[in-house]
Amino acid sequence: CGGPRLPPPGVPGEAEQPAPELVEVEVGSTALLKCGLSQSQGNLSHVDWFSVHKEKRIPIFRVRQGQGQSEPGEYQHRLSLQDGGATLALTQVTPHDERIFLCQGKRPRSQEHRIQLRVYKAPEEPNIQVNALGIPVDSKEPEEVATCVGRNGYPIPQVIWYKNGRPLKEEKNRVHIQSSQTVESSGLYTLQSILKAQLVKEDKDAQFYCELNYRLPSGNHMKESREVTVPVFYPTEKVWLEVEPVGMLKEGDRVEIRCLADGNPPPHFSISKQNPSTREAEEETTNDNGVLVLEPAQKEHSGLYECQGLDLDTMISLPSEPQELLVNYVSDVRVSPAAPERQEGSSLTLTCEAESSQDLEFQWLREETGQVLERGPVLQLHDLKREAGGGYRCVASVPSIPGLNGTQLVNVAVFGPPWMAFKERKVWVKENMMLNLSCEASGHPRPAISWNVNGTTSEQDQDPQRVLSTLNVLVTPELLETGVECTASNDLGKNTSVLFLELVNLTTLTPDSNTTTGLSTSTASLAREQGCRKLPEPESQGVVIVAVIVCILVLAVLGAVLYFLYKKGKLPCGRSGKQEITLPPSRKSEFVVEVKSDKLPEEMGLLQGSSGDKRAPGDQGEKYIDLRH
């Protein structure tokens, strides 16, 4: 594993010398050259050192009386004595220093000792470059596969090429390795090796790399390059179709149809679909990669597809095997009768049908609650009540394909007069405020709603038999006296809901009327309902303080009044029932005691246009007793 080595030079006129002593060092290190003469003090006190270059002795160092001095020349500044003059040290060794050095003594007779200096340097990591243009398999001679370069080594390293972990050797008309080297100004070598080979189709995935073998004083070593794959071109022999996703397809999926071929480079692809009427193949529009994308897939996309691969070099077109594509679907879900109408107490049979590419399962759901009523295509409803009116949904699904289903909603109408969401309701208001009142009724035929007061009204259909009417009106003293009524009517009758308006008035509970009126309606009413035990979160800390003070004052005043009446004998104990609390005339209007059968949040359900807090259909009203002066 080396470059040219000089044979031991002979000295003219002298007998053949013994083999020189071998000293091995790496580039940049220090070589220790020991003079092998007799170790007597006399012999080492007078020594001359020479370098032999091209069989010519060149003096480089001399020792006199144990003192050394360099001779002018290339070694003048790199030599020094060690071991009492027995060893000459050469620093910063370079490849140019690979030669023979000799020392010569003067007495008793002229003696000399030869030293062969060998220099080594590990090359850098090998760099490999692959032929990115590729190699055709029909080439008549080996083509360049890759180039391997190992820089700055000494002596010249050896290169070995590998394919799939197996070393390659020269093979006529199959494998050729061409190596060359360059000597740098430093004396180091740069090796370049080119691998040429004739490849076959099976080499399309072959891994190639190069290995550099070199020697150091410590022994033999090697360095490997990375693995590379060279493009291999071979003609197409087969074309086929591939569909993603794999498995059962359904409407709404994103489906990709792509062509594949066993040639490299792949041919130009086109995809066609057979027309079910004419049986002719019609080319489909593909994207830039030759892929047909169906998004969303529909049942009309089902059919017979075929791919054509055109080799642009040979202009030969190869077809794929036709492939059937099935997009599963559920469509045309229908319920009969489509708009059923029945009298109370009668029966109804609903039948569901649908079209599908697979076997179907049916189930019936109540639209309002989502409750499963029946499994199967037929739903039987007996002894219909008013509550049975509304939506019923048929769901037709394919159990073998999750997510594939179709639905149809049918509304069942049960004849009857209007049915009110509530009979009576109390609403807390403030005078001169704009108020939104809501009234809901259901029935068949669809009822119409009217109000007994003038205002801005609007209607919204909740379903075919249920309507919600909203009234926007100004709160006046007259409105507080009369209240508000909404009347729903159809051909079979009418019904009325009554809304009582209660004025929120807390001015008597605090001397600061502005603070009291600043409380929200819900806060004031909730303070009455819960006896000041719990206040809703106020809008600010000031409101909290005012509310707490108001509660304390109310409890103090009420306690004082009750105690005063009890002491005067006007408030007997132990009697059942309710009794009016007698107050001085000046304070009769300040206190209102209410006995209610419902809770305050329900009473305020329709305040400010709130339509979400409604009674159940069966709750036809509420009772309350108002005891006040």
Image (tube, helix red, strand yellow):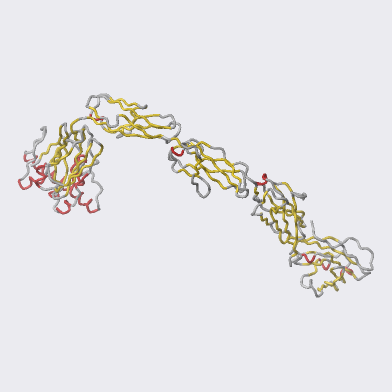
Quadrant of the rendered structure where residue 27 is?
Answer: bottom right
Question: In the image, residue 465 lies at what x, y percent?
Answer: 23, 35
Quadrant of the rendered structure where residue 481 is?
Answer: top left
Question: In the image, residue 275 lies at what x, y percent?
Answer: 48, 38
Say if 443 sits above or below 43 in the image: above
Q: Quadrant of the C terminus?
A: top left
Question: In the image, residue 515 lies at what x, y percent?
Answer: 17, 53
The answer to whether residue 171 is left or right of residue 418 is right
Q: Nearer the viewer, residue 606 or 19?
A: 606
Question: In the image, residue 152 lies at what x, y percent?
Answer: 72, 62
The answer to whether residue 24 is left or right of residue 497 is right
- What is the count of numbered marks? 0
Residue at 73 percent across and 56 percent down: it is 193
Q: Nearer the viewer, residue 482 or 364?
A: 364
Say if 249 sits above or below 76 in the image: above
Q: Quadrant of the N terminus?
A: bottom right
Q: Nearer the viewer, residue 154 or 358?
A: 358
